[in-house]
Amino acid sequence: MFWDLQHSEFVADAYLKKTWNETTKGVTLPVPDPQDLFIPSEVSDLIMLPPKTKRPPGRPPSKRKCSAGEIPVRPNLI
């Protein structure tokens, strides 16, 4: 059954030690301090707020609406 197979057949190449070493081989620079970065005044003067949204009244629907082109599936039919 599975006894004659190698463990490498069950593991993707992305998880092998060789691949991890290759990805970290280059130079890794530390993240600079945010206070050391130059931010233009026209950007720093902007006030960023989330969009104004209003929650719809009433109880949320219990069934989701089908997307365009989606065929509705009725789970009670076998």
Image (cartoon, helix red, strand yellow):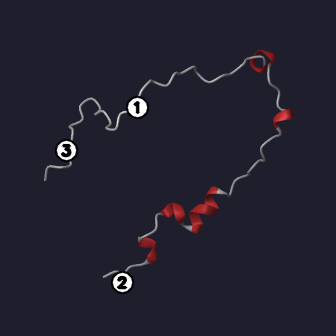
**Of the residues shown, which amino acid type is indicated by label 1?**
Arg
Q: Residue at x 40, y 31 (%)?
A: 59
Residue 42 appears left or right of 16: right
Q: Earlier in the sequence, mark 1 or mark 3?
A: 1
Q: Residue at x 57, y 19 (%)?
A: 52
| Few, some or many residues within 10 Å of mark 1 (<14, 14–19, 20+) | few
Residue 55 appears left or right of 75: right
Q: Which residue is mark 1?
A: 59
Q: Position of residue 24 (x, y in %)?
A: 67, 57
**Of the residues shown, which amino acid type is indicated by label 3?**
Arg
| Few, some or many residues within 10 Å of mark 2 (<14, 14–19, 20+) | few
Q: Residue at x 20, y 37 (%)?
A: 71
Determine the residue located farthest toward the top in the rendered image. Answer: 42
**Of the residues shown, which amino acid type is indicated by label 2?**
Asp
Which marked residue is nearer to the observer: mark 2 or mark 1? 1
Q: Are marks 2 and 1 in contact (CB under 8 Å)?
A: no
Q: Secondary structure at mark 1?
A: loop
Which marked residue is nearer to the observer: mark 2 or mark 3? 3
Cα distance, mark 1 to mark 3?
Answer: 23 Å
Cα distance, mark 2 to mark 3?
Answer: 44 Å
Q: Which mark is residue 74?
A: 3
Q: Position of residue 4 (x, y in %)?
A: 36, 84
Compared with 29, 63 (above or below) is above
Which marked residue is nearer to the observer: mark 1 or mark 3? 1
Q: Earlier in the sequence, mark 2 or mark 3?
A: 2
Q: Residue at x 83, y 39 (%)?
A: 33
Q: Position of residue 42 (x, y in %)?
A: 77, 15
Cα distance, mark 2 to mark 1?
Answer: 57 Å
Q: Which mark is residue 4?
A: 2
Q: Nearer the viewer, residue 75 or 23?
A: 75
